[in-house]
């Protein structure tokens, strides 16, 4: 590497989140401040709220249940046919 061309690398850079959590990592900046981390992010913390407009989530869940019921009934029909054939 050429001298003076690359930025200084800090292997113990401190990262701090708005929620108060902090950790160390490697970076070209000695200190980083972030607004959100895996500790306070709704998806990773389990506090995610689904905004359901017009019942889309419920419609999807109903369709998924119907397809599962159809799939289960197909399996039972096949086993009944096999049992009758024997």
Image (cartoon, rainbow, N blue to C red):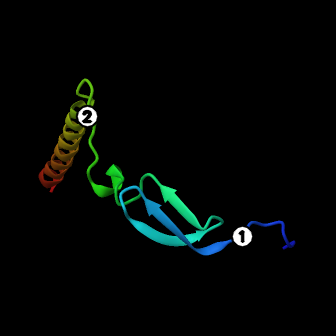
Q: Residue drawn 39% across and 59% down?
A: 38
Is 52 placed above or below 78 here? above
Disc on the earlier residue, 1 or 2:
1
Q: Secondary structure at mark 1?
A: loop
Disc number at residue 63? none
Q: Residue drawn 26% across and 31% down?
A: 52
Percent across and percent down for residue 17 are 43, 59
**Separation of residues labelled 1 and 2 (CA atoms):** 49 Å
Q: Residue drawn 13% across and 54% down?
A: 83
**Residue found at the far right of this picture:** 2
**Residue found at the far bottom of this picture:** 11
Percent across and percent down for residue 33 are 50, 58
Front one among 13 and 52: 13
Q: Residue drawn 66% across and 66% down?
A: 28
Quadrant of the frame with the C terminus: bottom left
Q: Is residue 35 left or right of residue 3?
A: left
Mark count: 2
Q: To which residue does mark 2 refer? A: 57
Q: Secondary structure at mark 2?
A: helix
Label 1–label 2 contact, CB within 8 A: no
Q: To which residue does mark 1 refer? A: 8
Q: Is residue 15 left or right of residue 2?
A: left
Quadrant of the frame with the N terminus: bottom right
Front one among 65 and 9: 9
Q: Is residue 57 left or right of residue 2?
A: left
């Amino acid at each position: 590497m050429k001298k003076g061309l690359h930025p200084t690398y800090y292997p113990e850079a401190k990262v701090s989140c708005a929620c108060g959590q902090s950790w160390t990592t490697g970076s070209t900046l000695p200190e980083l401040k972030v607004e959100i981390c895996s500790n306070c992010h709704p998806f990773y913390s389990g506090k995610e709220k689904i905004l359901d407009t017009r019942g889309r989530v419920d419609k999807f869940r109903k369709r998924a249940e119907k397809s599962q019921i159809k799939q289960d009934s197909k399996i039972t029909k096949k086993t009944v046919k096999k049992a009758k054939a024997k």
